[in-house]
Amino acid sequence: MNDVGKDSKKKSGESQTIDTTLKLKIDGKKRTFNIDDPKLPDWIEDSALTSGDFPYTEKLPNSEYADTLERLQIELVKMQYWLQDTGGRVMCVFEGRDAAGKGGTIFNLRQYMNPRSARNVALPKPSETERGQWYFQRYVSHFPTTGEFLTFDRSWYNRAGVEPVLGFCTPEQHESFLEEVPRFERMIVADGIHFFKFWLNIGQTMQLKRFHDRRHSPLKNWKFSPIDIEGAKKWDDYTKARDKMFGRTHTEHAPWTIVRANDKRRARIAVIRRILLSLPYKGRDLDVIGNEDALIIGSGPGFI
């Protein structure tokens, strides 16, 4: 059985070779949605933002978002200087369903940080050699050295979601992963790495809207692939896998931080604030950072 996760995207034209009509049950209603139709259905447009019990009916105003983001990004630069001065290490794992906003959040987090010591890791499917290694080995090789800030756009948690749902690992491999990962992460924390695990949570209708946006955007259609269609059909299976993952891997030493991410602006602000409030860097300005939005960010499966 192939040991792969969600890796490279197919060319947009390849999506034409599969059935792009989705038949779904959403909020108790049977829905049909053809993602190749350029017109987004009204039932998606009208309910996407509030889907999945999202607490706001409007996005954060762009002017407020831009001003807040700039102030927080200045704090991130200060934090990076502190890491370099002290030799500290930070590692952030970003997980979530397809189209949850992981890439955009990571981009805004790292936008003005020095790329020499702020790296992002987004691994492709494993090579033949990597498939024969200890599962965690190819991830460990990218871990931060002194003074580095590292983000993972998907991580070893592929084995808790994508792989078991799509049949890319065996049930035994899945169970072994869930058994081993708390001990693996205890070693990360014990070695002094500041370790964050973020799950960006979106509603089912919002996911459909973002898939549609990608499919019909000349700038973003490379992000859309047939595996997205298959993933959309397996929403409930992904939910079961996610809940099992939280139950087995949300620990005191490495807790999951849940971010309600239907509004990308609020989600990005929430992630950056959590990181800045957690690190005692020199010159930290708590008034500038501000308070967390308890409706958007919380800890563990109880916040879903």
Image (cartoon, rainbow, N blue to C red):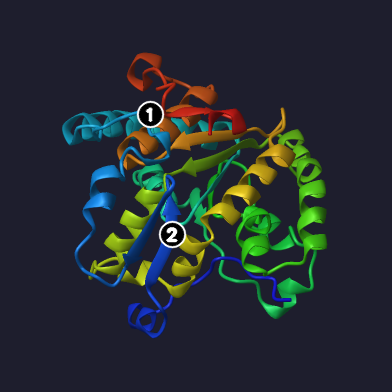
Q: Toward which corner of the image does residue 272 lie, by quadrant?
A: top left
- Residue at the (32%, 68%) spot, across then down: 35
Q: What amino acid type is highlighted by mark number 2?
A: Leu
Q: Which mark is residue 52?
A: none
Question: In the figure, is residue 240 to the left or right of 83?
Answer: right
Give the CA distance from mark 2 to mark 1. 44 Å
Residue 300 visible within the image: no
From the top left corner, tell me how far across and down residue 17 is, in percent.
39, 85
Q: Toward which corner of the image does residue 4 lie, by quadrant?
A: bottom right
Q: Is residue 17 above or below residue 161?
A: below
Q: Nearer the viewer, mark 2 or mark 1?
A: 2
Q: Residues within 10 Å of mark 1 (few under 14, many from 20)?
A: many
Badge 1 is on which residue? 75
Residue lying farthest to the left in this orientation: 63
- Residue at the (66%, 55%) spot, across then down: 156
**N-terminal of the two: label 2 or label 1?**
2
Image quarter hosting the N terminus: bottom right
From the top left corner, tell me how far across and down residue 184 is, in percent.
78, 45
Question: In the figure, is residue 175 to the left or right of 228?
Answer: right
Q: What amino acid type is highlighted by mark number 1?
A: Glu
The local secondary structure at tag 2 comes to strand
Residue lying farthest to the bottom in this orientation: 17
Q: Residues within 10 Å of mark 2 (few under 14, many from 20)?
A: some
The local secondary structure at tag 1 comes to helix
Q: Which mark is residue 24?
A: 2
